[in-house]
Amino acid sequence: MNRLWRRSSGACGELINKGFGTFVARWRVPMGFALGIAFLIFAQPTASLLIAGSLVALLGLGIRAYAAGHLDKMRSLATCGPYAYTRNPLYLGSLLIGVGLVIAGGRWFLAAAFIVFFIFVYWPVMRREEAGLLKQYGKKYEEYAAAVPLFFPHRKSAKARGEKFQWRRYQRNREYEAAFGYLAGVLFLALKILLR
């Protein structure tokens, strides 16, 4: 077993997987909506911040879309495309979308709130999900986890063979919802600039 599993298999890992991880997995969407509402109320965008932030968020949206087109949830272990560089490209994309929107919003206390939210919500969720993948795929997942980092990608990718991006997977994973959310956020911020 690699170091990752030795670290997460102890008492702390059990607490994350069964206690707090379960709680945040259940409540992450409502907590995200609450943070989103605060963002909409307090954001003070400017045209230059909106452009810069929108580009960062667009990069995150692209990563999420590319990952969704390689993911067959509960059917097979995704190891191709962006999954050859990070085990959690969807969450990496979400981080970039959030950072981009926070940049566009121009309020640094929102940035702090978002980073705290991301660390305390998504880190336990990732650990909980990887425990489930280890249970489901066993040694295959252990080998994959040993070669590919949990979150931040490496330049060198794992050598993985598999299927290419497929639009039907993108649609099945309902990733278009993230695109609609991105557009709604950008349009709202643009409207806020125009109405000032």
Image (spheres, rainbow, N blue to C red):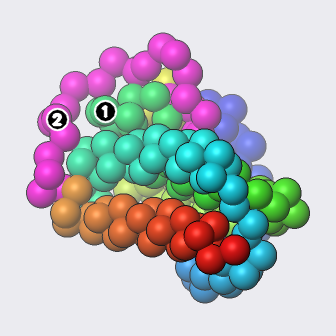
- What's the mark number on residue 81? 1
- Residue 69, given in percent of the width and then of the height, sits at 24, 48
Element under label 2?
loop
Above/below status of 38 relative to 54 = below
Q: Residue furthest top?
A: 156
- What's the mark number on residue 164? 2
| Residue 186, visible in the rendered structure | yes
Location of residue 114 by image quarter: bottom right
Q: Does label 2 or label 1 sit earlier along the sequence?
A: 1
| Count of numbered tags | 2
Above/below status of 123 relative to 189 = above
Task: Pick whichever, 48 or 13, lies toward us.
Answer: 48
| Residue 77, visible in the rendered structure | no
Above/below status of 194 relative to 70 = below
Residue at point 74%, 43% (across, down): 7
Question: What amino acid does circle 1 point to?
Answer: Gly
Q: What distance separates the C-alpha of mark 2 from that of mark 1?
A: 7 Å
Question: What amino acid does circle 2 point to?
Answer: Lys
Task: Pick whichever, 33 or 43, lies toward us.
Answer: 43
Residue at point 62%, 77% (across, down): 195
Q: Main secondary structure of the magenta part?
A: loop
Element under label 1?
helix
Above/below status of 90 relative to 110 = above
Q: Residues within 10 Å of mark 2 (few under 14, many from 20)?
A: few
Q: Looking at the image, do the residues carrying marks 2 and 1 touch, with CB atoms under 8 Å apart? A: yes
Location of residue 149 by image quarter: top right
Q: Which residues are magenta?
A: 148-169
For the N terminus, the quadrant is: top right
